[in-house]
Image: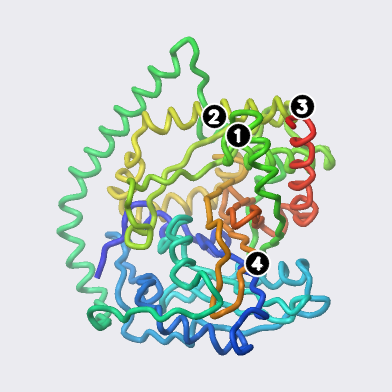
Amino acid sequence: MERLRGFDTVYCSLESPTSLFQVGAVVVFDPATAPGGTPLHLALPQVLADRIHLMPAFRRRLVRVPFGLDHPRWVEDPDFDLDRHLHRAAIPGPGGPAQLADYAADVLGRPLEADQPPWELHLVEGLEDGLVAALVKIHHAAIDGISGVELTAALMDLTPEISTVAPPRQPWRPEEVPSGARLAADSVLALARRGPALAGAALRTAQALGRIRRHNREPDAVAPPAPFTAPRTSLDRRPGPGRRVAFTRVERADVDAVRAATGTTVNEVILALSAAAVRAQLLEEGTCPLRPLVALVPVSTREAGEAGMAGTNRLSAMLVSLATTLDDPLLRLLAIADGSRQARDQDRLLGSHTIEDLAAALTPGVLAATARLAHRTGLTNRFPPCNLVISSFPGPVQPLFCAGAEMVGYHPFGPVVDGAALNITAMSYRDHLGFGLIAGSDTVPELATLAGRIPEAMGELLKVTT
């Protein structure tokens, strides 16, 4: 039994029917490469069964402490049944991106089952050209972007031949699910330690804020956006229970060309592409604000060599101005890059684990009560912490195969929650970057149009930089 960490508990505590802290990916495969032509729906379950010990999150379920007195626990599920997590489906013709997006939106808009390990895998057939998609959904408390890449790698091979994986050194042992009375009793000791932990975390946070304040007063410093100061836009609507999903991609060579010509990073180019797309959409609607949009950008806090699967979430976050008041795409990119560097400097001054330590010191009951108050009063809509979330992470450059089928596309998805009802996530794979866009169904009705603006923005940047 393992106690959840700070941010993992936050994701569980702030969840509601409309704020689902779930992450996922649509992975597209070409089954034509499979040896012997074995259908993916027959081969993939066996690969999962043989490699499940490499993915410990897949056999653990969450157990919550009564009244939110302490952090939930991960327990090796005594009732784990792989078949309960696997689903086979087919989409209607013509089997293109729009039909796959509709299916993904339906799945990603539903909460996970609370009484079993929080993940699902849907094998979706009926795609054009004989392709097959795997839609994976997992609770954010169990995984972040880096550990998600490692989870994907555990299922993949470098050739169509399915490699043999060594069995675990020790057999897996399920655990007895602890009773509420036992968890409540254990929490008494935790409550006794929470006061000093909270005081220490608060002191470290105050010291970090002091460092940031002194830094921002320096002559050449430009302070990043402060929390809850983002301009109000149509993106700030509270997401309903439904979701919309869209996909797009850009060429890695194009991103690298812009990056090299401007001295920026891949992440900054992704921010600029997202900013241009959202800006164009809001301008067309006549709702683009006179102040720059603000993106929340997750930042990995993993130490060098730290494994992702073992550590679940290791994240901080920074707020970055998207410079949407600038018309010129090159000037906008350079402004975003400068703002991103200032935000990274501020994040370093804050300390990689300061916010996580503060979250760990708070009880889930306090966090959940705060979330309910903000939801009832609409605080996150009147004072949005940001306008959207933009996340990216590097993926493999070599071709990958799962159960013999070649992976030809990967589109990741982050959570949609109150105060951040649009999420744009990107991952590189081979010669391209795959984007996954997800929003509340009422937040961005034309999400597919927004996705199509990202390659257009790539073309604009190429014109002015190369």
- Image coords of residue 308 (percent x, y): 38, 58
Rendered image: mark on residue 225: 2
Q: Which element carries disc 2, helix, strand or loop?
A: loop
**Cα separation between marks 2 and 4:** 38 Å
Specify the quadrant that holds the C terminus: top right
Rendered image: mark on residue 442: none
**Cα separation between marks 3 and 1:** 22 Å
Give the class, few, some or many, for how many residues have Cα within 10 Å of label 1's Cα (few <14, many ≥20).
Answer: many
Kindly identify which residue carries mark 3.
328
Q: Which element carries disc 3, helix, strand or loop?
A: loop
Kindly identify which residue carries mark 1.
230
Mark 2 is on which residue type? Pro
First of labels 2, 1 by sequence position: 2
- Image coords of residue 433 (percent x, y): 64, 52
Q: Can residue 143 be seen at all in this image of the molecule?
A: yes
Q: Residue at x 38, y 70 (%)?
A: 57
